[in-house]
Image (cartoon, helix red, strand yellow):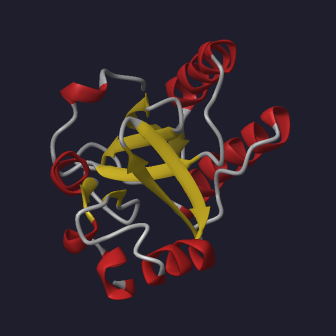
């Protein structure tokens, strides 16, 4: 069951998929339509899942699930991952590699492999003040408060 993202409680579970590149306006329209269709029918053992999504910065697909109504199961999570994999193939993008880092350079969103990000730390090209995206947040509340933060407030700080 697809609902408005803002209508979900802060306890809703979150999955964040970061793209290795910005999505075009045409891709955003197509991906949004596809996510609408997928989430309308998303279910766990036949029970509707109350879910929503948003796409941020033309780069991050954020799926939220209100688990107060019905909880995601292994099969329903697998279905969502398979859907994300289908987007990767269709648009030739990388959404599932967790060994990459996205961060802000002014208004631009940069995307680097973790090894390159570590090199940038040593070169002082990024700092504790660099705004990073903490894709490890688990709930909508954490997403709204702790997703887009200075590196000093994220797991990224261990490399500084």
**Quarter of the figure with residue 125:** bottom left
Rendered position, 72 above or below 69 = below
Of 90 and 118, which appears nearest the observer? 118
Residue 27: name its quadrant. top right
Q: Residue at x 38, y 35 (%)?
A: 107
Find residue 106 and report its horizontal and vertical position in percent. 36, 41
Between 105 and 101, the one lying in front of the other is: 105
Q: Position of residue 52 (x, y in %)?
A: 39, 31
Along the horizontal axis of the image, is 67 left or right of 105?
left
Residue nearer the viewer, 156 or 46: 156
- The location of residue 30, given as percent across then percent down, is 67, 16
User: Residue at position x 16%, y 40% from top?
Assistant: 9
Q: Is residue 148 left or right of residue 45?
A: left
Percent x, y for residue 81? 64, 52
Quarter of the C terminus within the rendering: bottom left
Q: Is the N terminus in the top left, top right, bottom left or bottom right quadrant? A: top left
What residue appears at the point 41 percent right and 47 percent down from the top-left corner?
A: 105
| The image quarter in which residue 131 lies | bottom left
Q: How many marks?
A: 0
Residue at image coords 30%, 28%: 5
Q: Is residue 158 above or below residue 132?
A: below
């Amino acid at each position: 069951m697809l609902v408005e993202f803002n209508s979900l409680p802060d306890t809703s579970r979150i999955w964040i998929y970061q793209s290795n590149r910005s999505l075009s306006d045409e891709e955003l329209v197509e991906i949004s339509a596809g996510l609408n269709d997928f989430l309308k029918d998303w279910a766990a053992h036949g029970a509707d899942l109350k879910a929503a999504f948003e796409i941020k910065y033309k780069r991050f697909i954020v799926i939220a699930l209100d688990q107060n109504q019905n909880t995601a199961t292994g099969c329903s999570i697998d279905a969502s991952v398979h859907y994300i994999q289908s987007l990767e193939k269709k648009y030739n993008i990388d959404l599932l590699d967790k060994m990459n880092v996205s961060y802000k350079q002014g208004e631009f969103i940069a995307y680097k492999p973790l090894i390159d990000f570590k090199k940038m730390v040593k070169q002082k090209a990024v700092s504790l003040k660099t705004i990073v995206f903490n894709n490890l947040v688990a709930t909508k509340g954490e997403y709204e408060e702790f997703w887009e933060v200075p590196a000093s407030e994220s797991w990224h700080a261990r490399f500084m």
